[in-house]
Image: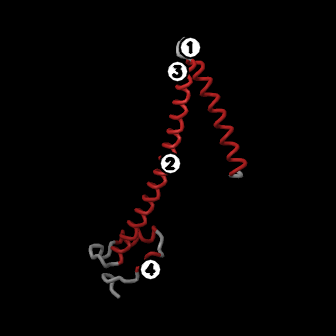
Amino acid sequence: MSDTEFTDIDSLKELDDKELEKLVIQGVNLHIHTSKASLAKRILENRRQLQQLKIVKDVKKSSNELTIIARGLKEIVLILNFFKKRWLPKQSIWIRVGSFVFGTLLVGILLNLFSDAIAKFILGW
């Protein structure tokens, strides 16, 4: 078997990245697409693309979780604004700010207790 017609791809797939990089750096017949070095280069590129794809999926998952949290916070603000407009329309700005802060703290404490209960009793953490 010559170095320009390499067909044992499975043996290359078993090598780790360092060994594949050595083959690529040596670059024997790298310009020939069926050579050992060229196949090693493509395997390395494929592994790196898979790693990047995994990172992108993780970032997308985190982004979705943050979007869900932001939507939840938006709902809380809408509820607090509803109560502010309904119960405190003609109060001074300090009373409205104080009630908003107190309401936000109260809702935050309730959400924390609720999430702790879910984590302890339902999920068993």
Quarter in which the N terminus is drawn: bottom left
The three-letter amino acid code for the residue at tag 4 is Asp
Quick one: 45 or 94, which is closer to the camera? 94
The span from disc 3 to disc 2 (Cα, nearest Å) is 35 Å
Q: In the visual, does 86 lie left or right of 28?
A: right
Per the image, the residue denoted by label 3 is 85
Q: Do the residues labelled 1 and 4 touch (CB within 8 Å)?
A: no
What kind of element bears circle 4? helix
The picture quadrant where one finds residue 79 is top right
In x, y percent, where is residue 59? 47, 50
Q: What residue type is labelled 3?
A: Lys
Q: What element carries label 3?
A: helix
Nearest to N terminus: mark 4 or mark 2: 4
- Whether tag 1 and tag 3 are in contact, CB under 8 A, the answer is no
Q: Which of marks 1 and 2 is in front?
A: 1
Whether label 1 touches label 2, CB < 8 Å: no
Q: How crowded is mark 1: few (under 14 residues within 10 Å), some or many (20 or more)?
A: few
Give me the disc on residue 10. 4
> Horizontally, is 117 left or right of 52 in the view?
right
Q: What residue type is labelled 1?
A: Trp
Residue 3 % position (x, y): 33, 82
Q: Distance between the residues labelled 1 and 3?
A: 14 Å
Residue under the image location 56 percent in, 24 percent down:
83
Compute the Cα span from label 1 to label 4: 72 Å
Q: Is mark 2 on a helix, strand or loop?
A: helix
Q: In which quarter of the image is residue 100?
A: top right
